[in-house]
Image: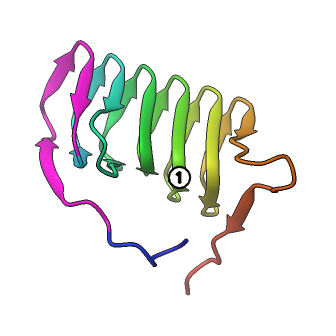
Amino acid sequence: MFGKKSQPPIKSLIAQGTRIDGNLRFDEGLRIDGEVFGDIRSGGDKPSMLVISEAATVQGEVHADHVIVNGTVRGPVVARELLELQPKARIEGDVSYMALEMHQGAVISGQLKPLMVGTDEKPLLKLAAKSA
């Protein structure tokens, strides 16, 4: 699951210094370095990746297949496949995930809710080792 599938290309960027007021829909890949005040959702039937960088702030719901957070999110996060929380990630809201990778230093102020495919399946949790 980790690194086996090719990642969707990042086709869109919200640059640092840019502020979006309103909901956002994207296909495939989106990187946010600025601010978004509204919900962010992936659309279409292709796999999606959302990167919220260290400089980024999102206030609203976040929904995508693969979500990487190293900035601040104020609202619920739903990662249908994998949620990666980098060391400077700050999430104020509930988190739903199929698989979770959390680095030391990441903070979640909310509930963790695994998305279950089958009743026998346990969620995949991985604590990333501190790099030297």
Residue 121: quarter of image: bottom right
Secondary structure under tag 1 reads strand
The amino acid beneath tag 1 is Glu
Residue 21: quarter of image: top left
What percent of the width, then of the height, locates residue 63? 44, 33
| Residue 25 in the image: above or below residue 128 | above
Residue 109: quarter of image: top right
What percent of the width, then of the height, locates residue 38? 33, 16
The quadrant of the image that shows the N terminus is bottom right
Number of labels in the image equals 1
Local crowd size for mark 1, using a 10 Å CA cut-off: few (<14), some (14–19), many (≥20): some
| Residue 127 in the image: above or below residue 51 | below
Residues rendered magenta in the picture: 7-27
What percent of the width, then of the height, locates residue 70? 43, 51
x 53%, y 44%: residue: 80
x 26%, y 60%: residue: 8
What percent of the width, then of the height, locates residue 13? 14, 44
Q: Is residue 52 visible?
A: no
Reading the image, the residue beneath label 1 is 81
